[in-house]
Amino acid sequence: IEQVRKAGPNPCPPVVVGVGIGGNFETAPLLAKKALVRPMGSRNPNPAYAALEDELLEAINRLGIGPQGLGGSTTALAVHVEYAPCHIAS
């Protein structure tokens, strides 16, 4: 949410936000990129991550950045979350 706030109008909203959780330093950004190319309207099959997608989308849209950064309630069209297991020793 903070990164979207910092970016403000620069990415020319509305945007699709990809989030990568887990894995390691290299895996998380790849997961985020994978999340970006997921079809619009698709949801993570894991109910916990699907709920996180909804929660993040609502919070991002409450920022009020809006289309082209001119204000409004549609800053993001979707938030897609992908995840991978993380081994503490890796």
Image: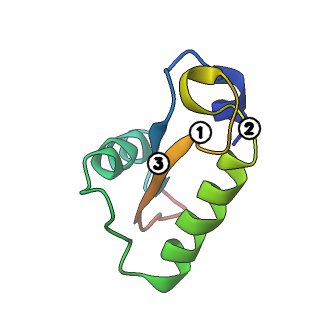
**Mark 2 / mark 1, whichever is N-terminal:** 2
Q: Quadrant of residue 48?
A: bottom right
Asked whether residue 86 appears in the rendered view, the answer is yes
Q: Nearer the viewer, residue 85 or 17?
A: 17
Report crowding for label 3: few under 14, some 14 to 19, many 20 or more residues within 10 A (C-alpha).
some
> Element type at marker 2?
loop
Instruction: Return the residue found at the far bottom.
Output: 47
> Element type at marker 1?
loop
> Element type at marker 3?
strand
Q: Nearer the viewer, residue 61 or 4?
A: 61
Q: Mark 3: which amino acid?
A: Leu
Residue 6: give x, y in percent of width and height.
Answer: 70, 23
Q: Quadrant of residue 26?
A: top left
Name the residue beneath numbered marker 3.
77
Report crowding for label 1: few under 14, some 14 to 19, many 20 or more residues within 10 A (C-alpha).
many
- The structure residue drawn at horizontal position 63% and vertical position 22%, both measured from the top left corner, is 69
Name the residue beneath numbered marker 2.
64
Total count of labels: 3
Name the residue beneath numbered marker 1.
75
Residue 25: give x, y in percent of width and height.
Answer: 46, 40
**In contact (CB < 8 Å): disc 2 and disc 1:** yes
Is residue 46 found left or right of 10 in the rendered image?
left
- The structure residue drawn at horizontal position 37% and vertical position 71%, both measured from the top left corner, is 43
